[in-house]
Image (tube, rainbow, N blue to C red):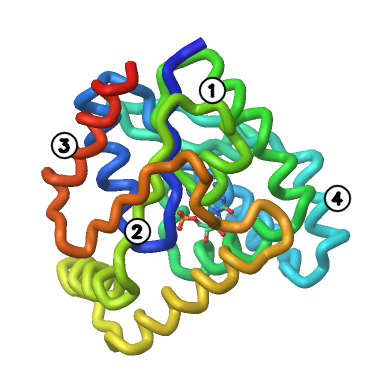
Amino acid sequence: MGFNIAIDGPAGAGKSTIARRTAQELSFIYVDTGALYRALAVFLVDEGISPEDTEKVGEAVKSVKVSIAYENGEQQVLVNGKNVTSRLRAEAVGNMASRVSAIPAVRAALLDLQRDLAKAHDVLMDGRDIGTNVLPEAELKIYLTASVETRAERRYKELQEKGEKKDFSAIKEEIEKRDYQDMTRAIAPLKQAEDAVYLDTSHMNIDEVVEAIKKLYRERK
Ligand code: C5P
């Protein structure tokens, strides 16, 4: 049984950057669970299945095999053996993931994979329901968040650096919509676990957040 760190929080809080860095510094395996939902979303998009057709989505995901591998320390996600990692960050895929992640069969399809990884290794896993649902016994739980304004600014800068132009208010609106979807769904909604440490990163840089998590780990190990 490994030491498990669960990091949950809303879209754009910097979870993956921080989780990746912290895991590397602690020599933990980093599991980006959003990527698993995104991988199923890629599959559904390719199959032309509508997120509204919950029955069809449920049927389809039952026969899909999602697995992960690591290439130069980077998580790769495979769907039925095919590496779909390069397609995961597309906006349409993120939106599809957010919509279908509310369907119980979708969550069930990914649960064992996540738990098996945590059993076998020291893992730092990030997502929306890791501390509340996937790894309720995790030794350290963090709820990582930042104001909507800050998250939208970060996303705006990130897109700018990639040379993509997008209206700030449109980004902010999308973040609010995603928050709403993730926090109000009936099954495994995004919320802070009772025993999670609340970390608001609005006024912290990446180094400070990584240090804060490492300090919490040292206190608990
Ligand atoms: O974190 P990321 O933006 O990659 O996640 C994409 C979507 O997958 C989220 O909006 C959320 O709806 C869903 N998700 C989830 N549970 C997780 C991780 C992600 O429902 N543990």
Residue depicted at x 85% and y 50% = 59
- Asked if residue 45 lies left or right of residue 197, the reply is right
> Which badge, 2 or 4, comes first in the chain's sequence?
4
Q: Is mark 3 within 8 Å of ligand 1?
A: no
In the rendered image, which quarter is residue 202 located in? bottom left
Residue depicted at x 62% and y 29% = 113
- Asked if residue 85 lies left or right of residue 48, the reply is left
* Label 1 to label 3: alpha-carbon separation: 25 Å
- Of the numbered discs in the image, which one, if any, rests on residue 59? 4
Q: Residues within 10 Å of mark 2 (few under 14, many from 20)?
A: many
How many tags in the picture?
Answer: 4
Q: Which residue is mark 1?
A: 117
Q: Position of residue 69 (x, y in %)?
A: 46, 27
Q: Position of residue 51 (x, y in %)?
A: 72, 67
In the rendered image, which quarter is residue 176 located in? bottom left
- Of the numbered discs in the image, which one, if any, rests on residue 145? 2
Position of residue 109 relative to residue 171, above or below, is above
* Label 2 to label 4: alpha-carbon separation: 34 Å
Q: Residues within 10 Å of mark 4 (few under 14, many from 20)?
A: few
- Asked if residue 133 lies left or right of residue 155, the reply is right
Q: Nearer the viewer, residue 199 or 186?
A: 199
Q: Nearer the viewer, residue 145 or 42?
A: 145
Q: Is mark 2 within 8 Å of ligand 1?
A: no
Q: Which residue is mark 3?
A: 211
Asked whether the beta carbons under mark 4 and mark 1 sit within 8 Å of each other, the answer is: no
Q: Position of residue 142 (x, y in %)?
A: 38, 42
> Which badge, 3 or 2, comes first in the chain's sequence?
2
> Which badge, 1 or 2, comes first in the chain's sequence?
1
Residue depicted at x 20% and y 39% = 212
